[in-house]
Image (spheres, rainbow, N blue to C red):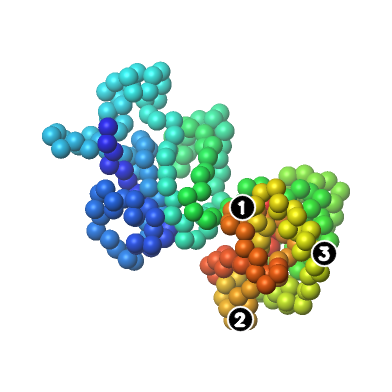
Amino acid sequence: MELQVGYQTYEWGKIGSESFVYNLLNSEQKLTISEKKPYAELWMGTHQNCPSYIKNKNSKQKSLIEVIKSNPKYYLGQNKNYQLPFLFKVLSVNKSLSIQAHPDKKLAEKLHIKYPEIYKDDNHKPEMCIALSEFETFCNFCKPEEILQNIQENEELRNLINDENAINNFEQVQSKENLEILLKKVIYADIQNLEVQILKLIQRIKNKKIKIQEINQYLEQMNNSPIMMQEFSFNISLIIQNYNLDKLYQWELMNLMHIYQVIVLNVCLVQIMLLEQDLLLNILIKKLCVL
């Protein structure tokens, strides 16, 4: 069966012909391009929000779910829901995506019953991602001891959290609850305080001199995975541009991993990815997370 797939125009998608999703769609379906329209996701599946259809020139167009329901055992085997248990997507990302909750199967079933307008089906939401191009994503939090070290060694982060009790509680008990409190302090930090701490951070990095032995140690750590490079992605493009900082020293205090071909500039200046201004606060959230 040949499918006619759908797409989503979420605002975080790449615009017009810059979008990989648009180009995939246009290669088969000959869409009318809109250079101002974001093409964020290609969907292939039976999800009711954007179902796929079967291409058929000789008869009325049918959705994929209709075809499956006509003979579910033939298409899916034993499946009580008569629909695909997965949704295939291709994403073309221009801005960082929102954080999402992925319940397990039992919780998903309960949430679907209680909030069907939000949870459209009862499936759990495990995800598998394959990089088609350069990208970055949060995958976990740093180890508790690394977070504590980051807080202790970074006055800017401590000032942004601005709650010694919360820090002390996490030092005593490294629980998810105490980590959540720290994260909320960063996410909901006062924007003026955030900008002050970021400017202090930039100045400190500019003044920092990296020794040759530190560079060699850093490169040695990368030997086991030559296409993986630690670097720091400061989401403060406007501030950086204002201060003419298009390159910064690699800064060892954040634990980030970026899928990227190894690039070393002028001994150990590393390329910095500049993201959107509205992601300003992520600079210090990333001190708590692994990228």
Q: Residue 70's spot in the image, x, y percent?
A: 27, 23
What residue did someone put label 2 on?
244
From what the image shows, is residue 159 above or below residue 55?
Answer: below
What residue did someone put label 3 on?
213
Q: CA distance from mark 3 to mark 2?
A: 28 Å
Query: At 54% from the left edge and 30% from the top edge, which residue is drawn?
Result: 105
- Say whether disc 1 or disc 3 marks the residue closer to the N-terminus: 3
Q: CA distance from mark 1 to mark 3?
A: 22 Å
Q: Residue 33's spot in the image, x, y percent?
A: 27, 61
What residue did someone put label 1 on?
227
Q: CA distance from mark 2 to mark 1?
A: 29 Å
Crowd class of label 3 (few under 14; some 14 to 19; many from 20; radius 10 Å): few
- Callout 3 amino acid: Gln
Q: Nearer the viewer, residue 195 or 242?
A: 242
Q: Nearer the viewer, residue 263 or 142?
A: 263
- Callout 1 amino acid: Ile
- Tag 2 secondary structure: loop
- Say whether disc 2 or disc 1 marks the residue closer to the N-terminus: 1
Mark nearer the viewer, 3 or 2: 3
From what the image shows, is residue 97 above or below residue 44?
Answer: below
